[in-house]
Image (cartoon, rainbow, N blue to C red):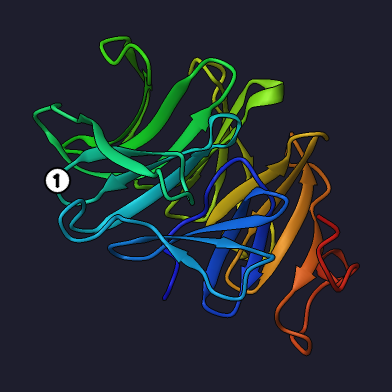
Amino acid sequence: MKPVCTCRPGQVVRADSGTVCTISPSALIIATSNSIVYRSLEASVPYVSTISQSYVQQTSSLAVNAPQNKTYYSDGISNEVFVIDKVGTDNEQVQQLFREKLGNASRIVDIAYDWLEGRLYYVLHIQEGYTIKWRNVNELLDQEVLVTETEPITSLWLHVNYQFMYYTMSDGSVKRCTLEGKGCKVIYSAILNGGYKVHAVTSDPREKTLYLSTSSSVIKTDMEGKDPITHMSMIKSSPVSQQWQLLETHSTG
């Protein structure tokens, strides 16, 4: 099983087969191409969700509403978003939350959940490029388009405690906006940082710290993208500048 995305909010953990993350201190949620797997860290056998081909054609992204024990996931083919209630239990329920009806939308790229406002943010591939929208999960007609880019947006992350939205671009850069899509700016450029392209962003909700994932390392920086350092590297012998030298050999969580 190869996870196709990260879930939120929680600690991102690097695994040999991809990226997984915690919904709580004792469980993992893993998205495969057509299923969701819930695994308790205390159990020897994972619990496989009831999601199957009858519910989804191709899982493209995953988001977690930890306080209410719900998981949202998108179908990259049908532009549907589903919700799993009581995830990881025998009473688990799966249902469609909404289908994106924007006429020029071809697929949902990534989703992220704002647990303070009850909003689901998502990246859409449209004819003009890529756009970020949010919907209120309790009032689905309450929605707004926030940002539109002509170049591909590859991933999305929310730092809800500090009201910021981060997203990565195909050139490996990272942009930051407010949760209302205002004040957008580039906070990390691959060109200015040794060519290291960022593919995903996560953060510690308790601190003003970002973790940027590249193909071979995890970079630690502040919320402004200043003074990036290598937090963890998967390549021990690669020649790097002093700025990119390995400072820590494991994730502190």
Residue 192 visible in the shown view: no
Residue underneath mark 1: 78
Q: Position of residue 71 (x, y in %)?
A: 44, 41
Q: Position of residue 123 (x, y in %)?
A: 35, 37
Residue at 46% x, 45% y is 87
38 with respect to 106 (left or right): right
The N terminus appears in which quarter of the rendering? bottom left
Q: Amino acid at mark 1?
A: Ser
Residue at 89% x, 68% y is 248
Q: Position of residue 160 (x, y in %)?
A: 64, 26
Residue at 37% x, 34% y is 122
Res 253 → quadrant: bottom right
Q: Position of residue 192 (x, y in %)?
A: 67, 54
Q: Is residue 224 above or below residue 144?
A: below
Residue 57 visible in the shown view: yes
8 with respect to 87 (left or right): right
Q: Is residue 215 above or below residue 91?
A: below
Circle 1: element type: loop
Res 225 → quadrant: top right
Res 104 → quadrant: top left
25 with respect to 170 (left or right): right
Q: Is residue 133 above or below residue 28?
A: above
